[in-house]
Image: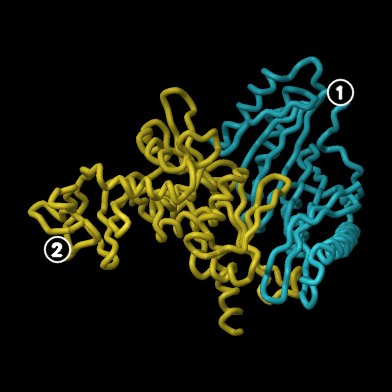
Amino acid sequence: MTRTIDLWGGDGLLGEVQERGKIAVGKFWTNRTVKGCVELQGFSSDRGYDYSLYGSFDNQRKVADVIDNILGVLLGDPKWVGLHLLEKGDRSLLDEPWAEHDPQKLRKQIGSNDKKANELGLELARERLGNKAIGKDIYVEYEIKVDYLIQCNNEELRLQVFALNDSIDETLENASEDAQQLGKIIGYHVPEVKGVELVDVADVDESTLMARIKTSTE
Amino acid sequence: MGSGKREWQVEKRFEQGATGYSPEPCSEPEAPQGLGIGEYEIGLGTDGFMLRRGGEVLGTYKEVKVLSPERALFKLERGMFLEVSLQGVRKTLSPEKAGMAGFIASDGSLSRPSAKSKRMDFYSASDELLDKFTEFMKEVYDVAPRRHQIKNREHFFMLDKAGKDIVEDMREYTHKGLKKNYWEVPFDYLDKESARMFLKCFMSGDGHIGWYPRSHPRVKLPLQVRFCSKNTEGLEQIQQLLEEDFGISHTSIYFGKNRSVLEITSTEDKVKYITEIGSFKENHIEVIERASKVIREE
């Protein structure tokens, strides 16, 4: 079972994280541990998105290097740094069916998910609202994820960016720019949207409503 | 989090006038004398302004601001005011101290690295926020925090055990009795001005004001106004503060992958937020200016 250890949550200097990582590995790495993964969660207030950055290692001694790599380029304000210790059979946080990086294909896949999420979301919102939806413009809002695999200093990093779909074009542009600051983008992953759940409907103005949905993927 | 309903908390705080205060003097007096607010009377004495009730002197202060015939603020130490109004007497945070609380709730922490030391951190990649935090810190505590640069563009403010009493003072209003990294809105100590500053500083650190015309062409004002935090109860309190003090009621909280998000949903309330509260963050200010221009041209 994967064990997660908090290394930093806004308490103390970020420069102490490497030392904390070494201590945590020394204390919690057991003979059942097969892999370690460092995760940094941050918020780019300029871009308006939360992100997670992952780097993994299979040798305890490499924890400090991976942390150094992850903290090397900060995309915004860091919020949390954690260490995941994986045992045999645990799902690695960097393993996904990565597609070779192609910005056009990535955009197309996200666009196709967006179309489906919008259709399903609108259907659910109209169903729930009944007559109240008549004459109203409804737009659908949900959290999108942009997921990149990046080659950085001979290591692989995973960058996940979470933003609202109503900033989809700007987010794709900004996330790609940020990912390139970290290294070379070598892969992307966009799971297909399979279903949606209606969470909430809110007023935007007299003639517009916003339907918040949650998407589920394969 | 919090301790009971807001109405009860406010009532409890307003009753404190009866216990009396003995604050230190602050600066030269400059307010009129002989003013009555409810059962309280403000008069000029030889050592400063006296606050009396039923002939009993509750305290003497060097500085008082009379904001209306029904409300006055006596300046206390360390960024506090004694508010006298028709509801009674209570202590409130100055806007600067409320701003510090907002900054710490968003991008900072009050921690205890060891049994003997306590620390206040504020970390940000934005120089304008670091400068604002320093300005407030000097105003409230007359202390300039140390600045640390980490990695390429990360900055930290850190106060260690030398500032132990400062950390304890700040904890009293936002972190008391809460688990690590949790904070609460200091409702009991906020008037409208300090509430505005708390929100403005929280927004600067952990909020987003964005303008997305390309992705959102159907909406006249493609504006996002959001607060984010891992502390969902804290966001619920911000939601309550927005509604009670500013009438911003069209909001909703959703759970993102990493954190909870409080979003202002209606156009009218977004406009109210950007015009009445705002942010200190440069790129938020740019968006506010752009949105304001569109609003003016409508």
Circle 2 sits on which residue?
B33
Marks 2, 1: nearer the viewer? 2
Between B271 and A132, the residue placed more toward the observer is A132
Q: Residues within 10 Å of mark 1 (few under 14, many from 20)?
A: few
Is residue B228 shown above or below A112? above
On the image, the x and y values in percent for residue A55 come to 76, 36
Q: Residue at x 56, y 39 (%)?
A: A10
Chain of the residue where label 1 is placed in the rendered structure: A
Residue A45 x, y percent position in the rendering = 62, 55
| Residue A100 sits above or below residue B243 on the image | above
Q: Nearer the viewer, residue B123 or B34?
A: B34
Give chain B's shade: yellow
Residue A88 is marked as 1
Mark 1 belongs to which amino acid?
Answer: Lys
The quadrant of the rendering that contains the N terminus of chain A is top right
Can you see residue B284?
yes
**Residue visible at 52% across and 61% down in the picture:** B279
> Which chain does the residue under circle 2 lie in?
B
Q: Are marks 2 and 1 in contact (CB under 8 Å)?
A: no
B298 is higher (above) or lower (below) than A43: below
Q: Please indicate whether residue B59 sits to the left or right of residue B113 in the image.
A: left
Amino acid type, mark 2: Gln
Q: Secondary structure at mark 2?
A: loop
Residue at mark 2 to residue at mark 1: CA–CA distance: 78 Å
Please name the residue shown 60% across and 55% down the image.
B227
Q: Is residue A177 left or right of residue B111?
A: right
Instruction: Look at chain A in the picture and name its colour.
Output: cyan
**Can residue A104 be seen in the rendering of this structure?**
no
